[in-house]
Amino acid sequence: MTDANTSTGAVLVLEDGTSFPGSSYGATGTALGEAVFATGMTGYQETITDPSYARQLVVQTAPHIGNTGVNRDDSESRRIWVAGYIVRDPARRPSNWRSERSLDDELLEQGIVGIQGVDTRAITRHLRERGAMRAGIFSGEDAAVPAGQLLEQVLASGGMEGAQLAEEVSIDEPYVVEPADHGWESDTALSIAAIDLGIKSMTPQRLAERGVRVHVLPARATLQDIEELQVDGVFYSNGPGDPATATGQVELLRQVLQRRIPFFGICFGNQLLGRALGFGTYKLRYGHRGINVPVLDRATGKVEITSQNHGFAVDAPLDGPVESPEPGFGLVEVSHICLNDDVVEGLNCLDLPAFSVQYHPEAAAGPHDAAYLFDRFIDLMKTTTASHAQTGRPAATSQENHA
């Protein structure tokens, strides 16, 4: 375990030249990435194992981190994905009946460089005012290098704009999560193809709990892969990187939409639906990262407290419905907006069986306000299947509906 007696000197250097001295936490060495802040008061293990945080240095705004240790059950993927970890006061020892080891031991074993003892409130205010930016954590011997050389390393590192990361965090081979045993027959259970762009383990679990068989496919999956499975729907997961680089996944999604296969996307999947429909995406100043983001469902007027982790957003008109910029996809509307800044938080296709949200309905970690979205997807698949059975063909196109 790394504590105050074994820590070495460390420094966080931002690309604008601002630096914050502290001491090492986890592994020692150098970590480069984009500095962002996460506002969750709990759920740090789910945060650091979320693949959407790949190539990012995460600042935890909650001052006390590591109090409950870590365990095998709460990890959201096969490893820690944050590039580096920035905390104020780490726990000297964990205290929880589910704890299997300390957080700093886990960081050390996985080679994650962190820094402790820094003013995370000051760092967060700095990033809010100037925006997320490239940064580096340097500890041990690496921190003894002259400040100018440390800044040069930061400036030489890559930013998130133009970063194609989904393939880096995705699985290599497909796998299946079977439906939970609630009286579902294996040959009657709904099935979906979930494209792993950085999927969290709780997402297919939430669908399996509802009697859905989930075929998790790599980010490079093709339409042939999907059609061979004869699934009832397609799901796009969360994930890291710039959605403008995901040309292959966007083209696949257009093929899915053209065939009227029911679609549900979250987070990165929401951005890719936007691009598939012909809208643009853009980088947010400092993004939404935490488990307390208020979102308005414009159809019901209900406010949901949501779990989010994204630095990009869809550029779509809030006054709708509007015709999709991509021909043939009909009308689309912005279904949800963020109450903090009016960022698009969801899209709903009116002439296609497709919708998406910019947040995490699986609630790992976070509130359960949005869990109903999984049920909505199931209802959409059932309705579409019934429609196909009655008509013997896919649902009508936009042009047919509005003739």
Image (cartoon, grey):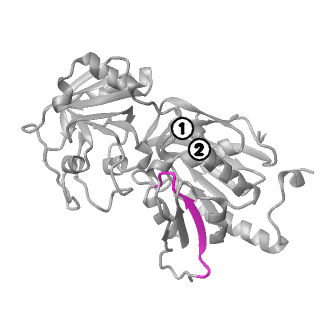
Q: Which residue is located at x 62 percent, y 48 percent?
A: 248
Q: Are marks 2 and 1 in contact (CB under 8 Å)?
A: yes
In the figure, 256 relative to 23: above or below? below
* Image mark for residue 242: 1
Residue 21, by quadrant, is: top left
Which residue is the site of mark 2?
246
Task: Point out residue 112 in the picture as x, y percentages from the top left corner.
Answer: 27, 43
Mark 1: secondary structure: loop
Q: How crowded is mark 2: few (under 14 residues within 10 Å), some or many (20 or more)?
A: many
Would residue 166 be seen by someone viewing this image from the given angle? yes
Q: Which residue is located at x 44 percent, y 54 percent?
A: 363
Taking 292 as reference, is 103 left or right? left
In the foreground, 187 or 64: 187
Q: Which residue is located at x 36 percent, y 42 percent?
A: 40
In the figure, 126 relative to 104: above or below? above
> How many numbered callouts?
2
Q: Which residue is located at x 82 percent, y 73 percent?
A: 390
Taking 165 as reference, is 249 left or right? right
Q: How crowded is mark 1: few (under 14 residues within 10 Å), some or many (20 or more)?
A: many
In the figure, 145 relative to 166: above or below? above
Taking 250 as reference, is 401 left or right? right
Would residue 344 be seen by someone viewing this image from the given angle? no
Task: Point out residue 193 in the picture as x, y percentages from the top left corner.
Answer: 59, 64
| Residue reaching furthest to the right | 403
* Start-end of magenta stretch: 187-199
Q: Which amino acid does label 1 sit on?
A: Asp
Q: What residue type is labelled 2?
A: Ala
Task: Point out residue 330 in the picture as x, y percentages from the top left corner.
Answer: 80, 47
In the foreground, 305 or 275: 275
